[in-house]
Image: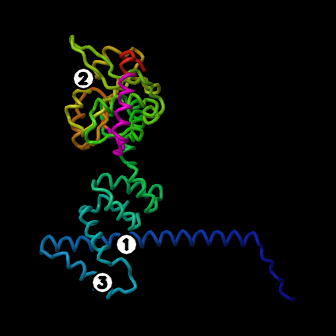
Amino acid sequence: MPKSRLVLDEGSYRDLLNDLKNRIRSAQVRAAVAVNQEMILLYWYIGREILIRQQQQGWGSKVIQRLSQDLKREFPDMKGFSSTNLKYMRSFADAWSDFGIGQQVLTNLPWGQNTVLLSKLEDAEERLWYAHKAVEHGWSRSALTRQIEGGLYKQQLGGANNFTLTLPKAQSDLARQLIKDPYHLDFLYADDNTQDQDLKRLLVAHMREFLLTLGVGFSFVGHHHLINVGGEDFHLDMLFYHLKLRCFVVIQLEMGKFTPEQSGQMNFYLSAVDSQERQEHDQPTIGIILCSSKNHVIAEYALRNLQNPIAVAEHRIPSVLPSPEQLQSELASVVQSLDEAPEDAP
């Protein structure tokens, strides 16, 4: 009897084909990851060997150029042995002398992303944070560069603050999310000769734009807000109330860099506001010190043992000025409007 002809089940075949394609792609990905991991480990080893010999045996920078030529001659089919890349390898080993700390995440990043971390960042903790985010979100080299240049790390941290030490967890988490760093005050202008008071007056005059910069929930209470302590008058730059945090927010604007003395002054202001303004249903008053620059470590030390919640954040103000006549006219208009307004008028 003739053998019966088997009919191919198209649906079953397509299922088999799709399964095999998925498995092959997964294997390709795993192979590519494994190759990348081995390459990163190799680059770190090469960089470490160069670094050790330069430090211990006094080899000069010319050895990198010679090594590049010899390696390219020996391995003509391999890329990555240019003088520039060998210098990156040396910097990579120097930045991660204890490679075990970041090995798991760094070997899962392409070399291009690792070089971005080296060239754009100085702080090891910040580099590692961006490395984790790049792996988590699959950032390309250009995407990683944009996130670094946009200051995502500082924004996520909410600036230097002591919120976790001074606020309940729910309030602390919310406050950290709401505080920015830096604040881009693109609607203002300043140069090295601009005085603090001039800038504060302009900021009040542009309160609508400033509120948009601060974010949703801020309500302006007053500028140059008066508090009296022990028979002496003190004035807060700006007082706000945050509807979601349910607390007063004091903002002090500084033209220069942050100094520890500013945190002590802010701590004093917050104690006074809590005593004189805060109601039973209000949460503890929060302070924000806006400065042109800060040393993060100094800011952390200055805030560490204070009892009131304070954040230190940077402001970014354009340095392109209008004409002196325009600036004088606007300042005169602002001064006139402030003189005519009640002391604590919004």
Viewer-proximal residue, 225 or 323? 323
What residue sits right under mark 2 in the picture? 268
Q: Amino acid at mark 2?
A: Phe
Give the farthest residue toward the right: 1
State the residue at coordinates (31%, 56%): 121
State the residue at coordinates (39%, 14%): 280
State the residue at coordinates (30%, 17%): 226
Viewer can see residue 284? no
Q: Position of residue 125 (x, y in %)?
A: 30, 52
Q: Quadrant of residue 47?
A: bottom left
Q: Quadrant of the C terminus?
A: top left
Q: Amino acid at mark 1?
A: Glu
How would you rate the neighbour count of disc 2 (Cα within 10 Å): few for under 14, some for 14-19, many for 20 or more?
Answer: some
Whether 81 is drawn above or below 220: the answer is below
Q: Position of residue 79 (x, y in %)?
A: 38, 79
Viewer can see residue 211? yes
